[in-house]
Image (cartoon, grey):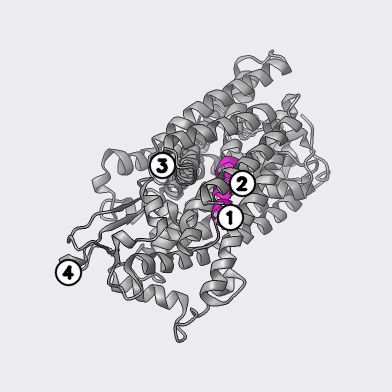
Amino acid sequence: MDVQTLTFLIVGLSFALYIGIAIWARAGSTKEFYVAGGGVPPLANGMATAADWMSAASFISMAGIISFAGYDGSVYLMGWTGGYVLLAMCLAPYLRKFGKFTVPDFIGDRYYSRTARLVAIFCAIFICFTYIAGQMRGVGVVFSRFLEVEIETGVYIGMVIVFFYAVLGGMKGITYTQVAQYCVLVFAYLVPAIFISMMMTGHFFPQTGFGATLIGSDGVYVLDKLDGLSAELGFAQYTEGSKSMIDVFAITGALMVGTAGLPHVIVRFFTVPRVKDTRISAAWTLVFIAIVYTTAPAVASFARVNMIDTINGKDGSGTEYAEAPGWIKNWERTGLITFDDKNGDGKMFYTAGKITDPNSANEVNVDRDIMVLANPEIANLPAWVIALVAAGGIAAALSTTAGLLLVISTSVSHDLLKRTLKPDITDKQELLAARLAAMVAIVISAYFGINPPGFVASVVAFAFGLAAASFFPAIIMGIFSKTMNREGAIAGMVTGIGFTAAYIIFFKFVSPELNNPEHWFLGISPEGIGLVGMIINFAIAAVVLKFTQATPIEIQEMVEGIRNPKGSAEAHDH
């Protein structure tokens, strides 16, 4: 069977599995819709959390960034992984003990304020829609290549599938769907990586192949080969990078604290039966994440070597366009690879475009989001492996999209309606409102998927920055400071997310021509400005606290109760 037929078959079977699970696990109450009834086993929750957290940015785009940026791309690995540890150790068990459904729920009750709840609802929805834009774009990219449809059509197909299990099943359906999606995505990520590692280095494990010598190269290491190719073609050294130390620090920090403040990840820890299960679940999640994250640098490096050798030829003189491999023509149809024969010699040549020889100007533009998806094709792997990767990319994007949609729907139905505007609505009315909110959110997210504000991982990085500047300080102070009051928390969240959003919007959309280190604040890029937003949040909150009323005694006692280990085996039911 050809690639397209196999893709239809494997992706179709995976969709049937997801929809079947959604129907089986259909939510019958708001507790099942919001937190899967609070009875998910730690192992299953760990797998579901890993799938929720490893989005299209992790599966599709992270290795693509590392492949193109080399050392500079490592900030995503360090930031996202470190952030998950921070979340698991410092936030998740305390939030689970608090026993609420959502992050705005915690902020509204902890800061004894309707305004604080409304600010948190706004932040949650803003962050989630920013994040969803990247996920739906990832779905469109996968479909456009492997089902040979327009990116827009791919987004619509993904929208319909997510509608079924997010709107029908709620958190219960999403949880068990994400368990299946993790199995699909991890298998799809590892199989081609192992194949290519064996072919290029003779090592079964990609993690060791990444640091090994290339077969038939007289002892040349993979990374040495990449450094040589990068220098020869005018790129920055692959293992050195070009970002300043402060920008690397800021991006890593923003991704770390942003991870710890992401509402769709935090809500996953409300689904386990007990507080101690939260820590067990977090440990399992780290194991499941590590399997993919330790493989990503190897995938990136192998793909980069193969791509350059394929386009420029083994001798570096270029490849005849008429004889170009099938993968180039396939991706060219999607518009994600373009060829401009600048010197009219009929040969493709890929460089940084900085080489003095005009005959060597860059003629091939490759969208970095295709690297993981195209990797099996570049390496001439069997058709079933190529189809499997397509299914994995879709699973990664859909799993996170579903989690984000749930946060949006619960923010509207539970936090806005039930807890703020209409406290007397019934459980059945609240469940209906949650489903309607999810439907509207799916339509809006499809629009962002069709008109994305950047490539997948870049858009996702902005969501982390916004979460770092808004939720993280409010949650940390809410847990570890008995004295932080509502005025301080609200002022901090508003200024933090306001500054960060304004900085990103200015450099990315208003004046992109100024988006360079010369014009950045302290040399910090829009991807890293969330760390500065976080510091501003903390600082403003501390200043406002000095000039406003003290936190009520009952709130201080509630915070003490959250932190007190006594009774931590069981969570409070509210």
Alpha-carbon span between mark 2 and mark 3: 41 Å
The total number of labels drawn is 4
From this viewpoint, which residue is outermost toward the front?
1
Disc 1 or disc 4, which is closer to the eye? 1
Q: Secondary structure at mark 2?
A: helix
Query: Badge 4: how crowded within 10 Å, few (<14), some, or many (20+)?
Result: few
Q: Secondary structure at mark 1?
A: helix
Query: Do the numbered discs 3 and 4 sit on residues whose CB atoms are within 8 Å?
Result: no
Disc 3 or disc 1, which is closer to the eye? 1
Q: Which residue is mark 4?
A: 356
**Which mark is first along the chain, 2 or 4?**
2
What amino acid is found at the position of numbered circle 4 in the picture? Thr
Query: Do the numbered discs 4 and 2 sit on residues whose CB atoms are within 8 Å?
Result: no
Query: Do the numbered discs 1 and 2 sit on residues whose CB atoms are within 8 Å?
Result: yes
Q: Position of residue 211 (x, y in %)?
A: 52, 76
Q: Which residue is mark 1?
A: 384
Residue 392 part of the magenta segment: yes
Disc 2 or disc 3, which is closer to the eye? 2
- In the rendered image of this protein, does residue 556 appear above or below residue 514? above
Q: Which residue is mark 2?
A: 10
In the picture, the disc for residue 412 is none
Residue 558 visible to the viewer: yes
Specify the segment rendered in magenta.
384-400
What amino acid is found at the position of numbered circle 2 in the picture? Ile
Alpha-carbon span between mark 1 and mark 4: 43 Å
Alpha-carbon span between mark 1 and mark 2: 9 Å
Query: Badge 3: how crowded within 10 Å, few (<14), some, or many (20+)?
Result: many
**Which mark is first along the chain, 3 or 2?**
2
What amino acid is found at the position of numbered circle 1 in the picture? Trp
Q: Which residue is mark 3?
A: 500
**Which mark is first along the chain, 2 or 1?**
2
Disc 3 or disc 4, which is closer to the eye? 4
